[in-house]
Image (spheres, rainbow, N blue to C red):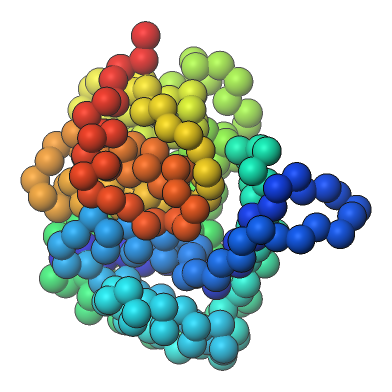
Amino acid sequence: MIVAAGLTPAWQHILLFEGLRAGEVNRAREVHWCASGKVLNVAVALHSLGGPSLTVIPAGGATGENIARELDGLGIRYRQVKIAAPTRVCTTLLDTAFSSPTELVENAQALAPEEVQEYLRAYGEAAMDARAVVLSGSLPPGTPAGFYRDCLERTRCPAVLDARGPELLEALPLEPLVVKPNREELGRTFGKELRTDEDLKAAIEEMHRLGARWVAVSQGKAGLWLSGEGTILCLRPPVVRTVNPIGCGDCMAAGIAWGIARGMGVPDAVRLGMGAAAQNASVLLPGRLDPLTVRSLAAGVEPAA
């Protein structure tokens, strides 16, 4: 079983336009609602790839009920920690003329200390039987920066950590197997802009020094840097027609964990994750993957020239 965990799920509103114009009335060609946010994108992707998985989420209010209904409908196993605050709503505006979406993101509301402790208890019980875990997403305001460290203390299996900033740095002494920030997030974690590849390599080396065993730094279409066990390489992602890039990093994390849980070495698991990210970019709703397509795209991942 693979466990997906994180504190910032969302009820996602996706609107598709033909020629979105700022300051004018725009009528959507398509409208969709779905469970999303990093932890739920990972959960949906794991379910799509196949095999047992479980997600642990805090959820409250009518939006939390909407998420539970959709997960039930999809057949996704989850454990809900009920919270007082309603789950946030995030909106994605897609224009058929452009590949870059416009995101309207509602920040998650603060969790009460007892809600965080209940979540950690639920996560610890779920992680006991896991073969891999994915910990992902930002933390609600007021959540201790050591939250992911506390999760890793309850984890006996390989962990994929997709985080940034203080919460990432606090977790590194627990030596997660794979740490997966993107280039901007890694720079922000160390308070600097990673303008050159040498800047990037220095930041990766610092991540290793602090405890990360493998570091995978995504850069969208520019490729992914992977470092671990004394090697570093840049991998070129598959080329696909982009429909909606939201959730690509989450699908990558899911694919990495899926591969690791099945005995793949980290480089091959990362290639599978890149295939999952590429396929996700080519579909409208995040995490809804086809395993055969993912494997086919993963086979096309090659070292960058």
Tell me if residue 136 can be seen.
Answer: no
- The residue most toward the left is 263
Q: Residue 44, percent across and down? A: 35, 63
Q: Residue furthest right?
A: 23
Is residue 274 placed above or below 64 in the rendered structure? above
* Nearer-the-camera pick, 29 or 302: 29
> Quadrant where the C terminus lies?
top left
Question: Quadrant location of residue 14?
Answer: bottom right
* Residue 64, placed above or below residue 160: below
Q: Residue at x 75, y 45 (%)?
A: 19
Could you say where residue 292 lies in the image, as x and y percent from the top left? 21, 44
Q: Residue at x 85, y 49 (%)?
A: 22
> Outermost residue toward the top?
305
The N terminus - image quarter:
bottom left
User: Does residue 14 appear anywhere in the picture?
Assistant: yes
Q: Residue at x 76, y 61 (%)?
A: 27
Up the image or down, 101 lies above or below 140; here it is: above
Q: Residue 124: percent from the left, percent from the top?
A: 26, 75
Q: How many marks?
A: 0
Of residues 286 and 118, the one nearer the viewer is: 286
Q: Nearer the viewer, residue 219 or 138?
A: 219
Res 298 → quadrant = top left
How far across and how far down the image is residue 231, in percent? Answer: 25, 20
- Closer to the camera, 57 or 271? 271
**Horizontal relation, residue 181 to residue 291: left or right:** right
Looking at the image, which residue is at 37% across and 57% down? Answer: 288
131 relative position to 300: left or right: left
